[in-house]
Amino acid sequence: MVLEASFDAAPAAPAETWTPPTSERPLVKWTLVGIALAFLGFFLFLPLVAVFVEALRGGVGIYFDAITEPDAVAAIRLTLIVAAIAVPCNLVFGLAAAWAIAKFRFPGKSLLITLIDLPFSVSPVVSGLVFILLFGSQSLIGPWLISNGIEIVFAIPGIVLATIFVTFPFVARELIPLMQEQGTGDEEAALSLGASGWQTFLYVTLPNVKWALLYGVLLCNARAMGEFGAVSVVSGHIRGLTNTMPLHVEILYNEYSFQAAFAVASLLALLALITLSIKSFLEWRFADGLKAQRSGH
Amino acid sequence: MTFLRRSLVGAVGATLIFVGSASAQTTLLNVSYDPTRELYKEFNSAFSAHWKELGNGPVTIRMSHGGSGKQARSVIDGLDADVVTLALEADIDAIAENTGKIPEDWRADLPNNSSPYTSTIVFLVRKDNPKGIKDWGDLTREGVEVITPNPKTSGGARWNFLAAWAYGEKAFGGDEEKVREFVGDFYRHVPVLDTGARGSTTTFVQRGIGDVLLAWENEAFLSLEELGPDEFEIVVPSISIKAEPPVTLVPGNTETKDTTEVAKAYLDYLYSDEGQKISAKHFYRPSNPSAADPADLERFPDLELVTVDDFGGWKEAQPYFFGDGGVFDKIYTPGN
């Protein structure tokens, strides 16, 4: 369902035989369009513009100073490292979970689906605290970790774990409805024609879900780079070491360095815009493939 | 599935190894609170240079800043601090109690109750002081709005409460009934009781609510410097409380990291002439004023200062004033 919705929103594939499903008068239509645009403009476009305006208020020089300052560079690097670990992990997790749920029957399946949604329903702060309770020095295994010199919380592993936890549902949530809808027919056909399990996955299942997978990965990546709450709890806020970009923005803001805060925030916004552009570009580039998949392969 | 699981375990394992192989150079972690950033930025480079001059290897000092209570919590949960430089004695006590990494009598380790610098509670008012606020008595005048956080949730706000109380005691000659009335009246002039000091500053500065913000002197100067002296000014009342932000070593961490010697030197250096000079420059009152730049000292007007010991120390004052059913609960009813 989610996938369908995203395609409907994409201008990539207007069918030629399209007829309006309703026959409202133009006034109603344009009023609704107007409301939607005003809402988007006010709640999305305006804040985005504000970020860039604030970031560049004191001039380009200060802007570049803010984003090339060592602590900012370390924050950017850490954010990219965390996303580079968390996103592939969730790609594998999500694919495995969606595959298991959509293609197999087993007891406790609905429980598993509920569990996958857990990170969405739990407050990020709690997600972070969970890892403190599990791996902090007051936890059961904390003393063992310390005596073996393994750092998890207040170090990069804790940040990665918290990020994986929070972004876990994105890929699985995109894939499950699509895979359920597609059923197991293609796979059964492939297997009956003599393909191995791995071949079936690689040449049948994966191509069937690649768009949903890509979309899930992009969303997952956007959230992994932007996550604040959970990461804030496990980070320890050591400058130049465990501060991610969102944490760095908060610190700068609290220190009245408004322009620097907005400069780093604008980088985060840019990353989000790049993510969206990549998605749009791929949708445009592979419009034919999309259309084929949409009309039910 | 086995394959996937294996690759997952591999990925997490790789992360651990990747992070485990951090540098072996001498590194100190100073876990501090929010407004000390500029102070320690300058102090850290001064100390690094000093440490090298003594013929030691290079030392890198890492900083972690945040709310004082939150920072203490992080150290309790395993943040590997070599030294903690926080806002409140109670926060360091909490680390000592919960982890045993700090000896219970830590306050006696360093001079002046382990506070190399102090501060006090002053008023930040809008430019040209339109309401003519001079002292605590003016805060309960008709139409004056005061911004201070909730002393139940904010450690910093407890100093504000005690400072107001100290004024009341002086003004009413120790008649506790009248003091309670005054402090209660004072809190009825607070339109927004934020949970923390940062929230209060935002309320006053960004949202433009209230006529006077109660703030630590160093933070008031910081706001003034960062936000423009053409918008606010500082008013120093006749009497206030001496806030003593404490510093201490975390031997439980430094002994395993083998950094005790350098961490001790680091804290001692805060008391040196150079350390005192830097403290004064960053708006903290130095414990040894003779070392500071006279121009910096001029910014700190003389006033009568009580200390928390006049209230029996935090161990007594905390439950008496701010515990459930304590004085604050009795004199303050929200929305009155």
Image (cartoon, grey):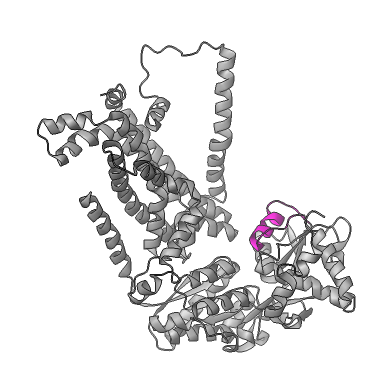
Quadrant of res A42: top right
| Residue sitting at x 43%, y 40% | A273
Q: Nearer the viewer, residue A10 or A181?
A: A181
Q: Dividing the image into 4 quarters, which one contains the N terminus of chain A?
A: top left
Name which residue lies at 33% across and 30% down: A283
Q: Does A230 sit above or below residue A36? A: below
Q: Residue furthest front?
A: A107
Residue B36 lies, in percent from the top left, at: 58, 70
Q: Residue at x 25, y 53 (%)?
A: B5
Residue B197 is a magenta residue: yes
Decide if residue B120 is on the left or right side of residue A136. right
Can residue A190 be seen here? The reply is yes
Q: Of residues B219 and B102, which is closer to you in this image?
A: B102
Which quarter of the image is occupied by the C terminus of chain A?
Answer: top left
Query: Any magenta on residue B211?
Result: no
User: Left of B31 or right of it: where is B333?
Assistant: right
Number of numbered discs visible in the structure rendering:
0
Coordinates of residue B301 in the picture (x, y in percent): 76, 76
**Viewer-proximal residue, A139 or A266?**
A139
Q: In this view of the protein, can residue B299 be seen by the observer? A: no
Q: Position of residue B78 (x, y in %)?
A: 45, 71
Image: magenta residue range: B192-210
**Residue B155: which quarter of the image?**
bottom right
Residue B227 position (above or below residue A22):
below
Query: Which x, y percent locates residue B116?
Result: 61, 82
Horizontal side, residue A20 vs residue B24: left or right:
right
Q: Is residue B182 left or right of residue B319?
A: right
- Name the outermost residue toward the left: A194
Which quadrant holds residue B157? bottom right
